Image (spheres, helix red, strand yellow):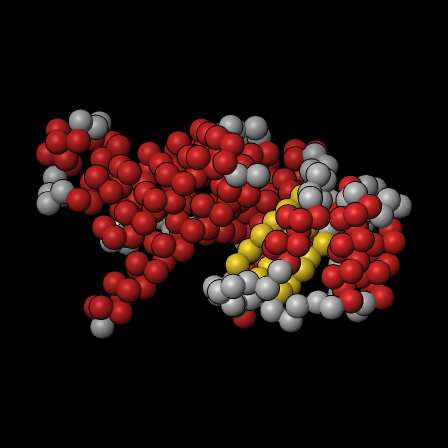
C-alpha cells in the first residue's frame, strides 16, 4: 500500500487481513512499524513457522526503514514464502522509493492511496461512501455534512454509513442536522450499548465517533467492561424480578432493567468469554498494545462475534 491517505491505507490493509482470515482462519498475524525495527526481528517473523500454517506480516511506515531493513525486505522478494502474506505500507514521498520499485518488479500487488485534499475530492468521497452504504445524498446534505464533520475522512465515512443506517433512502440536509446533534453525545457507554446488543456496524461506527470526539480510550474500555460484567451478574442470578436483582446486586433498578435487555441473546459461557476480552483490553489501552484504537476496535468486533456465536448456537438448539 502506498500513498498519503491514512484511511485508504488502513482500509487496504484491512481488506488483505480479511482475505487472509477467510482463507486461513487460524493464520498467525504480526504488525510491525518499520521505524526502529531491527533486521533480526524482521527475520524472525519472516522465517518459516515451527508450527506450520499461514502467516500475515504487515510492516508499516516502510518509508522510515533503515538501509539494512530496506535491503532485507528487498531480499525477501527474491524468494518469498508461499505460506506467508507480506504487506508493506509506504506513506508516500520519495524516501525508500527503491524499495517500492523492487516489490513492484517482483510482481507485488499495489494499492494506491492518494491524498484526498481538494473540496471536490471530499465531496466525491462523501457521495461514494453513501452510495457504498446503499443510499443517496443530496448536494445540500453533502455540504451540511462537510460543515458539521470537517475534513477528517474517518469521521465522514462513519457519518455517511450511519446516516444511511438511520435514515435510509435519500439523505437530505435535515437528516444530517438531526444526526449530527445526536452524535455530539457519543460516550463509551453508547459504544457499549451497541456492542452488547450485537450491533456490529453500529458498534464500530459509535466507537469511531467516540474516538473522533476525543473520548479517552480507557473510558471506552471501562464502559465495555462495566456493561459486560453487569450483564453477566444479572444473567447469573435465578430471578428476573428487577427489585430483587437491584437489592442483590446493589444497583439502581434502571441499570438492572437495561442490563436484562442487554443480556438477552447471551449465554453465561459467552459472557465469560467477553469478560476475558475486556480484561485483555484493559491492559491494551494502558500501554500493552501498539495501537489503542486498533485494540478497541478488535475487542468490539470480538465481543459482538462472541454474542453472535452464542445466539446462533441457541437458535440451532431450539430447532
Quadrant location, the N terminus:
bottom right
Q: How many marks?
A: 0
- Residue 179 appears in the rendering: no
Which one is nearer the viewer's eye here, 34 or 217? 34
Q: Position of residue 16 (x, y in %)?
A: 63, 61
Q: Quadrant of residue 80?
A: bottom right
* Image: 243 above or below 86: above
Quadrant location, the C terminus:
bottom left
Using residue 275 as the reference point, say whether residue 32 is left or right of it. Answer: right
For image coordinates 51% across by 63% down, the residue present is: 50
Q: Quadrant of residue 78?
A: bottom right
Which one is nearer the viewer's eye here, 120 or 197? 197
- Residue 211 appears in the rendering: yes
For image coordinates 60% across by 43% down, the residue present is: 159
* Image: 98 above or below 206: below
Using residue 99 as the reference point, say whether residue 287 is left or right of it. Answer: left
* Image: 288 above or below 263: above
Q: Quadrant of residue 224?
A: top left
Q: Position of residue 146 (x, y in %)?
A: 70, 38
Q: Position of residue 190 (x, y in %)?
A: 43, 36
For image coordinates 79% across by 58% down, the residue present is: 74
Q: Position of residue 104 (x, y in %)?
A: 82, 63
Using residue 312 as the reference point, say whether residue 68 is left or right of it. Answer: right
* Image: 236 above or below 311: above
For image coordinates 59% across by 45% down, the residue present is: 158
Which one is nearer the viewer's eye here, 127 or 245? 245
Using residue 1 as the reference point, say whether residue 24 is left or right of it. Answer: left
Amino acid at each position: 500500500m502506498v500513498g498519503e491517505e491514512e484511511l485508504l491505507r488502513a482500509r487496504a490493509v484491512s481488506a488483505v487481513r480479511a482475505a487472509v482470515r477467510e482463507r486461513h482462519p487460524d493464520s498467525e498475524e504480526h504488525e510491525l512499524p518499520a521505524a526502529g525495527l531491527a533486521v533480526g526481528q524482521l527475520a524472525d517473523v519472516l522465517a518459516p513457522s515451527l508450527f506450520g500454517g499461514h502467516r500475515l506480516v504487515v510492516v508499516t511506515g516502510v518509508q522510515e526503514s533503515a538501509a539494512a531493513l530496506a535491503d532485507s525486505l528487498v531480499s525477501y522478494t527474491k524468494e518469498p514464502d508461499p505460506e506467508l502474506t507480506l504487506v508493506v505500507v509506504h506513506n508516500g514521498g520519495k524516501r525508500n522509493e527503491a524499495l517500492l520499485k523492487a516489490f513492484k518488479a517482483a510482481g507485488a500487488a499495489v494499492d494506491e492511496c492518494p491524498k484526498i485534499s481538494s473540496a471536490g475530492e471530499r465531496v466525491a468521497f462523501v457521495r461514494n461512501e453513501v452510495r457504498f452504504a446503499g443510499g443517496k445524498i443530496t448536494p445540500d446534505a453533502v455540504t451540511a455534512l462537510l460543515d458539521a464533520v470537517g475534513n477528517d475522512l474517518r469521521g465522514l465515512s462513519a457519518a455517511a454509513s450511519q446516516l444511511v443506517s438511520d435514515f435510509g433512502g435519500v439523505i437530505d440536509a435535515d437528516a444530517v442536522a438531526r444526526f449530527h446533534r445526536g452524535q455530539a453525545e457519543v460516550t463509551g457507554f453508547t459504544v457499549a450499548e451497541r456492542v452488547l446488543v450485537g450491533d456490529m456496524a453500529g458498534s464500530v461506527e459509535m466507537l469511531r465517533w467516540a474516538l473522533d470526539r476525543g473520548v479517552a480510550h480507557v473510558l471506552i474500555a471501562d464502559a465495555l467492561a462495566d456493561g459486560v460484567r453487569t450483564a453477566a451478574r444479572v444473567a447469573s442470578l435465578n430471578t428476573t424480578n428487577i427489585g430483587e436483582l437491584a437489592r442483590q446486586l446493589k444497583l439502581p433498578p434502571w441499570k438492572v432493567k437495561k442490563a436484562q435487555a442487554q443480556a438477552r441473546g447471551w449465554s453465561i459461557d459467552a459472557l465469560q468469554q467477553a469478560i476475558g476480552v475486556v480484561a485483555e483490553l484493559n491492559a491494551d489501552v494502558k500501554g500493552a498494545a501498539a495501537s489503542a484504537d486498533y485494540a478497541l476496535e478488535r475487542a468490539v468486533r470480538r465481543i459482538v462475534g462472541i454474542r453472535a456465536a452464542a445466539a446462533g448456537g441457541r437458535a440451532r438448539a431450539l430447532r
